[in-house]
Amino acid sequence: TKKNQALDIAGILDHLKIDKADLVTHDIGNMVGYALVAQYRDRITRWVVIDAPLPGIGDWDNIIRLPLLWHFNFRGPDMERLVAGRERIYLDRFWNELSGDPKKIDEATRAHYAALYARPHAMHDAFEQFAAFSQDATDNKEFLAKGGKVAMPVLAVGAEKSFGAAQADDLRFVASNVTAGIVPGSGHWIMEENPDATVKLILDFLAK
């Protein structure tokens, strides 16, 4: 679960003797990020959260029914067998359909990640992230009910051709100090599609 992954990150911070840190997350990293900031509110000083929803929060019940996000419910041993040996085909669909311009995700990038996901157990672990969404939703609702909204400054960045302004709307359910940002001309893959604008948004926010 994302709750357990957050505990792992806290353990790494402890090992490195880092008491407080800024946090930048994207995609499923957002989900782990919320579990971290909700459990360690005094350790995360600023949080940049980029272009993905939080399980159980805001419009989640409708988001998981969007045809474009069918992969949220695509998991299990049969699905792993379907994808085995076809990782590149499966991943190309993500890059092509979730981007603003598929050509922005070049061949070298596609080949690199396809090779990583073709390694033993890698695709299983990826599917397990989605399989945990139901428990993640329960955990997130519990974090919010017990602790209320987090207070640290939050920059909620949506890609113009993906979550857009809805990213900030979503984060306002769990955070009281939210600034909205948009990566122009980009789909979900912000660092491949518009890295300059993404980096500027992040650095300007963290420098405040």
Image (cartoon, rainbow, N blue to C red):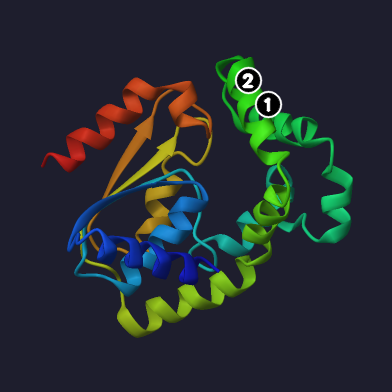
Residue 204: horizontal and vertical position, in percent? 18, 34
Residue type (three-letter) at the residue carrying disc 2: Pro
Which quadrant is the N terminus positioned in? bottom right
The residue beneath circle 1 is 96
Residue placed most toward the observer, 179 or 98:
98
Residue 38: x, y in percent?
A: 34, 71
Q: Nearer the viewer, residue 164 or 52?
A: 52
Determine if residue 65 is in view.
no
Q: Please state if 78 lies on the left or on the right of 173 as rendered.
A: right
Residue 134, quarter of picture: bottom right
Q: Where is residue 184 in the image (x, y as percent from the top left)?
A: 40, 25
Q: How crowded is mark 1: few (under 14 residues within 10 Å), some or many (20 or more)?
A: some
**Is 68 rendered above or below residue 53?**
above
Name the quadrant containing residue 91. Answer: top right
Above-or-below relation of 205 to 173: above
In this picture, residue 162 sits left or right of residue 79? left
Asked if labels 1 and 2 touch by Cβ distance under 8 angstroms, the answer is: yes
Q: Name the residue under label 2.
A: 102
**Quarter of the view holding residue 64:** bottom right
How would you rate the neighbour count of disc 2 (Cα within 10 Å): few for under 14, some for 14-19, many for 20 or more?
Answer: some
Mark 2 or mark 1: which comes first in sequence?
A: 1
The one nearer the camera, 94 or 20, is: 20
Kindly identify the amino acid type of the residue bearing the numbered disc 1: Asn
Residue 93 position in % (x across, y down): 73, 32
Circle 1: element type = helix
What residue appears at the point 68 percent right and 64 percent down from the top-left corner? 131
Q: Is mark 2 on a helix, strand or loop?
A: helix
Judge whether residue 145 can be spotted in this image: yes
Residue occupying image coordinates x 50% and y 47%: 27
